[in-house]
Amino acid sequence: MLEPAVAIFILLSLILYALMGGADFGGGMWDLLAAGPRALRQREAIARAIGPIWEANHVWLILVIVLLFTGFPPAFAGIMTALNLPLTAMLIGIVLRGSAFIFRKYDAQLGRAQYRWSTVFGLASFFTPFLQGMILGALTTGQIRVVQGRVMSGFFAGWLTLFALACGLFALALFAFLAATYLTLDTRAEPDLQNDFRRRALCSGLALAPIAGVVFLSSKHGAPQMYNGLTRWWAPLLLVWTSLVSVVALVALWRRWFALARIAAICQVTLILVGWCLAQYPNLVTPDLTVDNAHAPPITLRLLLLALGAGTVVLLPSLAFMFHLFKGKESS
Amino acid sequence: MAMSLAFHIIFAALGIGMPLLMAVAEGLYLRTGKTVYLDLSKRWSRGTAILFAVGAVSGTVLSFELGLLWPGFMEKAGAIIGLPFSLEGFAFFTEAIFIGVYLYGWDRLAPRLHWLAGLIVVVSGIFSGVFVVTANAWMNAPAGFKIVDGTITAIDPIKAMLNPASFHEVLHMTLAACVATGFLVAAVHAFFLRRDRDNSFHRGALGIALAVASLSIPLQMLSGDFSARSVGRLQPAKLAAMEAHYRTQNGAPLLLGGVPNNETRTTEYALRIPRGLSLLLADNPNARVIGLEEFPRGDWPNVRIVHWSFDLMVAAGMAMLALAVWSGWLWWQRRSLPDDPRLLGALVAAGPLGFIAIETGWIVTETGRQPWIIYGVMRTENALTPMPGIAVPFVIFTALYIFLACIVFFLLRRQFVETAGTASETSRTSIHA
């Protein structure tokens, strides 16, 4: 039971990264797409929303990586070798985005350079999550082959397929939707801005449906094991729930129940990632590396779980405190 | 990788040292109520924030880079030393949360709570450094596993984390962060004080930075001595290379500088202190010290690089110790901030010394361990990624880090210039008050 427990923690970190870091990426996209008479104020609202929590949101990704290499070292080595190219590109995206953000946040003198950094920030906010979606997609294609710890499929397997590209697009749309939904709450005090972000949330939320369809259809050939997973007994149930919360999110946005919309959007992202993981379980890298054959020895897993438990005890109150301080009602 | 780590170690050291200065300043403000200290902790927290944000980005890159460049190493080592990395993840997380709270919480928290947030940043920063250094120490003194027929068994991550090199490496690195940050910050404010000696903002800043630096450098010398003895015990080949000591002998001399020659197995032009090495390592002028000749030629690190880096580190440490003694003596005489123009000039010149010592010390640990990536267990060449054209990612990552370093430099310079501008204003207002 140790391996699935660590896997669940990895999934949780991934979900939290998507919910927090992903929304930051979405914020960057809306920053680049800011338009109309209120473009500048939209950008300011985005910067205010991301500012205090950006660094902490980012650490979830580091957590996913360290958990992977502690709990499943062969899988980590295999993924890092087979997907070396897109991962390197993604890191370039993260560095550019981070630097642009740091510049905008901390440069003492504002000016034209600020605008240039904004463009870098926005472009990298598209580029990076697209690659992240591709990378996650590539792991499920079954094209990455690892035999006795050696990657046999070269450096281009999996991530250049139609399915992986569709996953990239899906990640983009999902993060954009998430960010716009959060921003409707962050702009409570400014109804005109709130309207802007409501419209954006509705558009991106509607765009999600056809992209999800493409992902599903392309998975039949692009990720057959995933497709089989999605047709297991629990799948319709999960699909119904996911569709339900998606519709609730859209309706709530339409009716301006923004707090409800945020909860529904969070549930939606969580259900999507949970479904994706269930469909691919027990594979880590389909089909050769699984939770059962690529894990660290039990003592490491046990200590890791202890550390995770202790870490959670420290972390959760701190996180709650931070969000209470910066996202609580009185702060608006 | 080496390049990335060489950059990251600077961010990391400042990431431990800067919060300390900032928290000390705020603590002084709470005690004395002088606004100049409040102003100071706000300024320093801006610097801390920039460094932390860049550190967060460079840390993300590093965690991936471990796998992208060294999949072989990670596959073997992940299960053994992944634990401190995971703990580091949490420590870093705590730091990230409270740095946000600290920076944006000036108006939202009671003063003491706000200071507490700063202290949490300091403690979690130290912890994340400690965890990462234990992983490095493990590469030097691998423990907590057995190798039977080429496969790793009997893994004990706790033993690996508390390996024999952990204690001295952790102590030495944590103190190094305080020393290096203290002297660097002291240099910046000494520079401004040379122009404007009565500026209370810079006087307060210099006082805090100099106190932190001067208190930690003597401790650092002691921990350095302790480290060298531990290395002599754990990695005699590394120690021999550090001291350019080729032949095993009783009553070994201490060699300063010189040109180590692997062919003749002698070190030419060095300053020799008879029996010095034996005395330093064993408190006994006749003690026997093992030389490089005891090890196969293929197991030698690059003696010149290791020896020169080591001597440079020690020299930098000695120079800083001298400065600390000088400042302390001036303070003892006058019971006020030492602002002798000659001392200020020397402090400005000594600004980079701490970081020179960190970098050269880092070179000693890493180059001194070669040709092993895990000492005595795995050779570096066996850990490298099979990716063809490995030079390309090396170049990419190096370029990324140079890019980050430029950004930090540019932003901090802007901050300092701004500080200089508004600081004179604050000092004026605080005089009025």
Image (spheres, grey):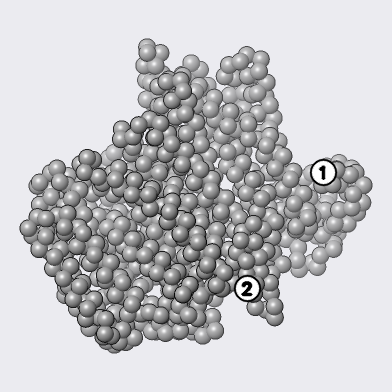
Residue annotated with mark 2: B382
B352, above or below B309, in the image? above
Q: Which residue appears at 17% of the width and 68% of the height?
A: A246
Residue B417 pos. (x, y %):
41, 31
Q: Quarter-wise, where is residue B325 in the image?
A: top right
In the rendered structure, which amino acid carries the disc numbered 1? Leu
> In this view of the protein, can residue B258 be seen by the observer?
yes
| Side (left or right) of A225 relative to B312 | left
Label 1: chain?
A: B
- Residues B29 and B187: in front is B29
- The C terminus of chain B appears in which quarter of the rendering? top left
Q: Which mark is residue A99?
A: none
In the rendered structure, which amino acid carries the disc numbered 2? Asn
Residue A224 pos. (x, y %):
32, 87
> In this view of the protein, can residue B305 be seen by the observer?
no
Residue annotated with mark 1: B280
- Residues B73 and B91: in front is B91
| Side (left or right) of A128 relative to B369 | left
Label 2: chain?
A: B
